Image: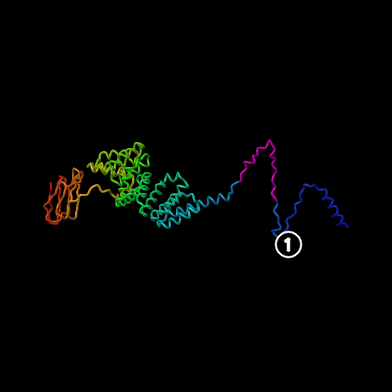
Amino acid sequence: MYFIINIIIFKIWLKGKRPDSVAIAPPRILSARNQIPSASIKPQQAWVAPINTNDKHSNLNIASIKPIESVSSKLNNDNSKSQAQEYFNKALNKTDMIQKIGFYNKAIDLDPDLLEAHKNKGDCYVNLKKYQEALDCYNKIIKINLKYSEENNCQGLALKCEGLILNESKKYEEAFECFNKAIELEPDDFDSYYNREIAINELKQNSDLVNANRNKITKQTANDLDGYKKNANVLLFYLDEYKEAIEYFNKLIEINPDDSVAFNNKGLALYYLQRYEDAIQCFDDAIESNSKYTLAYYNKSMALFRLEEYQKSIDCFNQAFKLNSKLKQFTIVGKEINKLEEHTNTVYCLVLLPNNQLASCSSDKTIRIWDLNKGKEINKLEGHTGDVFCLVLLPNNQLASGSWDKTIRMWI
């Protein structure tokens, strides 16, 4: 009876409690038998404070509320870039081009905007002579970041690759134009000079193309910058029309007085015409416009050599080599300016003489003296009875020769 009365009193007490009070039940320990299935547990809805949009005194702008960036997303992005840099560094430490490309690919997969990886990957393909793949890499950079592309001459590299592809396809006229544009962007791109000469030499083998291009020059009126450049380059490097080429280079310089490439090429035309002093002035103008123009220094050194200014020639070449050590490894596919044909057998030795003269000896038992300015033989020295295979210029400007006839002879 006492128990029943207590229950009734407890119920009455509950009814008298305030409605906003909350009773917290003690934690219940569930056994394996009485666990509640997780699917039956419903999550409680989070409480959201109501916002009165009609409150004039409220400073809250609903439109300005933006979702907070996921911290985990930012961390993942930073982690991907860090891993990409690790793969990039691994590529730098490799020497095998295929392995390098593999690591650059992994770096690019993790960070597509890692421009250095695209650039180095393209350079690897160039070394492997896979020019189309290299071209794709450089064009990708141009598309992603034009500023980086300009700073690293990616457009020039792309033009060079395109020229190489055209050379392989025997489309030499188009290749010639690509290399000219590449050189304009990077005047000291030795590879473009070399491969342009390959295209030129191939073009010269086709007399029909030579005549066709000559006709284009005579009929065409170049009234724009690109037209002047194209005509000037074709006349100078392809048709060997130096005087007419100079006229076009003068027009280019008139349009742009700081065009270092136009000055240099005009100097080359003057050099081929043996106007060495005028050529040196043009090379100086090119250097004034571009103080780091390696080939302008080199060309000036050659013109000084022709004028027998030997020490100045050496100084100029040293300056060119100082600017670009690759000059030592660069082999110029030369333009023949004269052919000396008088010897009737093998020529063994050449010696440069004063007054821009050249001495040569041969197994035809003769020594011949040439005037380099005129490109003609001016003397023939005979006396040996065997092959003449050695020459040396003595301090007193006498010439000494050695022969299989067991004699050394002196010549004044």
Q: Which amino acid does label 1 sit on?
A: Asn
User: Where residue 15 sits in the image (x, y, percent)?
Assistant: 83, 49
Q: How crowded is mark 1: few (under 14 residues within 10 Å), some or many (20 or more)?
A: few
User: Residue drawn 39% across and 47% down?
Assistant: 156
Q: Which colour scheme is used?
A: rainbow
User: Where residue 383 sits in the image (x, y, percent)?
Assistant: 11, 52
User: Where residue 186 sits in the image (x, y, percent)?
Assistant: 37, 45
366 or 252, nearer to the observer: 252
User: Residue drawn 27% across and 48% down?
Assistant: 335
Q: Which residue lies furthest to the bottom in this view?
A: 33
User: Residue drawn 34% across and 36% down?
Assistant: 254
Q: Quadrant of residue 271?
A: top left
Residue 21 in sight here? yes
Q: In this view, does 383 lie to the left or right of 136?
A: left
User: Residue drawn 48% across and 55% down?
Assistant: 106
Which region shows up in magenta? 45-67
22 or 199, nearer to the observer: 199
Q: Is residue 378 left or right of residue 20?
A: left
Q: Is residue 365 left or right of residue 205?
A: left
50 or 90, nearer to the observer: 50
Query: In this picture, is 131 found above or below 254?
Result: below
Q: Is the magenta stretch mostly helix, strand or loop?
A: loop
Q: Name the residue under label 1.
A: 34
Q: Tag 1, which secondary structure?
A: loop
